[in-house]
Image (tube, helix red, strand yellow):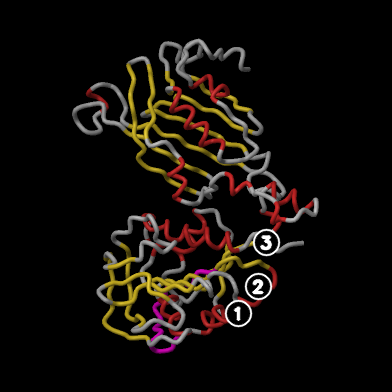
């Protein structure tokens, strides 16, 4: 039986406050990622014996690396673990020290600062708008450890290092402190999963090949045909249409993509338009400024597929404070409307709500990306199309 996969938190914090631990735990809980916490080499060894550690995060601390304090757990992890390790603040300083850098000290700097330079070509930061981040440090490496490259600076100080060959990464600031910098941790988590692909999490094509003793080099994997993005990755936003058009009883409106929030098994998508002269003034014309799409993912399978036939999406669409549609999606192309706004509906038959054909097709394409078992088409969403006569709510039950 394969071991459970989990992240390891290397807890470098100073008791009794144990600052810098809770925010890392909070991030992993929000993202729905399994984790174990270790404070000593013995605990790391014990966890390694029963868990497949796919990545480790080494926390900040009130201890000082320049004084050689509390380095045992960090050093043991760096020496013994083959998985990617991300060192944050003290964890970063300890990593630099372990690999031979000199550690300098100064008066504490604390607060939100903008890094003065970031390597935007590096995978951890590529495409991200990183502005103010939270720093709290005394120590920093005065030189690069052998084999590492610099990926970040603050006021001329080394604030980030990376060695892809050893899978070691360190940053001086605290991305776990602010949700606006969670995307950095998301990138690290994604890299950990890509480094560790046990059979239980292979795609259906990989699993099929394994069962039939096929040579993998002759098989074109699903991931090669269409880009896959984790629902824990902010890049999922790139798969959504930039603009959608709706029509209701009062007119036609175009809304632009605004925000996306990832919260464990909930994806919250927001589109926005200002229909009134005054910003966010609904009362001026009665038309809301926001359309929200909430997607709850529900999965129940043995783990042989990342998203198997049992994956279900519960989708709610709200316009302003009104629920305009609620439906579920299941494989292969089962779509069931639970709430409908339009002709023939029980509560909203005097009003209508629909997407134009291009917008609806873009949303169907987005839903299809959740599982290669989905075979959805625009015809499965007649309750949301622009033809007022295409959907009969009575015949759908």
Category of crowding for the residue at label 2, using alpha-carbon neighbours closer than 10 angstroms: few (below 14), some (14–19), many (at least 20): some
Residue at 66% x, 32% y is: 332
Q: Which residue is mark 3?
A: 4
Whether residue 199 is visible, yes or no, is: yes
Q: Is residue 29 left or right of residue 51?
A: left
First in sequence, mark 2 or 3: give its number: 3
Q: Is residue 241 left or right of residue 9?
A: left
Q: Nearer the viewer, residue 282 or 18?
A: 282
Q: Nearer the viewer, mark 3 or mark 1?
A: 1
Could you say whether the residue bearing mark 2 is in a helix, strand or loop?
helix
Q: Which residues are magenta?
A: 56-69
Residue at 61% x, 37% y is: 312
Q: Which residue is mark 2?
A: 48
First in sequence, mark 2 or 1: give its number: 2
Whole-angstrom CA distance, mark 3 to mark 1, is 19 Å
Q: Which residue is mark 1?
A: 80
First in sequence, mark 3 or 1: give its number: 3
Image location of residue 296, percent across then percent down:
54, 39
Image location of residue 33, percent across then percent down:
56, 57
**For residue 61, what is the image quadrant?**
bottom left
Magenta span contains residue 26: no
Q: Is residue 275 left or right of residue 233?
A: left
């Amino acid at each position: 039986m394969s071991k459970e996969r989990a992240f390891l938190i290397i807890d470098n914090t100073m008791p009794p406050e144990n600052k810098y631990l809770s925010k890392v735990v909070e991030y992993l809980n929000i993202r729905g990622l399994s984790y174990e916490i270790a404070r000593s080499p013995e605990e790391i060894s014990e966890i390694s014996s029963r868990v497949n550690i796919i990545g480790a995060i080494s926390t900040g601390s009130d201890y000082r690396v320049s004084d050689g304090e509390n380095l045992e757990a960090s050093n043991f992890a760096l020496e013994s673990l083959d998985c990617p390790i991300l060192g944050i603040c003290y964890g970063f300083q300890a990593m630099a020290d372990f690999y031979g850098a000199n550690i300098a000290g100064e008066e504490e700097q604390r607060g939100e600062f903008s890094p003065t330079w970031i390597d935007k070509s590096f995978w951890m930061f590529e495409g991200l708008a990183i502005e103010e981040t939270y720093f709290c440090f005394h120590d920093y490496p005065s030189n690069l450890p052998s084999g590492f490259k610099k990926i970040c600076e603050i006021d001329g100080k080394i604030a980030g290092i990376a060695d892809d060959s050893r899978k070691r990464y360190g940053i001086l600031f605290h991305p776990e402190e602010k949700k606006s910098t969670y995307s950095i941790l998301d990138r690290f988590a994604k890299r950990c999963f890509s480094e560790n692909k046990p059979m239980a999490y292979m795609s259906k094509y990989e699993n099929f090949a394994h069962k039939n003793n096929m040579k993998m080099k002759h098989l074109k994997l699903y991931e090669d045909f269409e880009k896959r993005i984790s629902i824990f990755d902010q890049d999922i936003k790139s798969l959504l249409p930039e603009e959608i058009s709706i029509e209701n009883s009062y007119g036609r409106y175009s809304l632009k993509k605004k925000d996306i929030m990832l919260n464990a098994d909930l994806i919250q998508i927001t589109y926005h338009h200002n229909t009134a002269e005054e910003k966010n003034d609904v009362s001026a014309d009665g038309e809301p400024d926001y359309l929200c799409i909430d997607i709850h993912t529900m999965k129940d399978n043995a783990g042989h597929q990342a998203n198997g036939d049992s994956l279900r999406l519960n989708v709610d669409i709200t316009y302003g404070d009104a629920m305009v549609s609620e439906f579920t999606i299941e494989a292969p192309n089962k779509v069931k409307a639970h709430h409908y706004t339009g002709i023939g509906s029980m509560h909203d038959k005097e009003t209508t709500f629909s997407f134009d054909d291009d917008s609806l097709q873009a949303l169907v394409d987005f839903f299809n990306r959740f599982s290669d078992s989905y075979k959805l088409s625009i015809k499965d969403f007649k309750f949301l199309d622009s033809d007022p006569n295409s959907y009969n709510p009575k015949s759908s039950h």
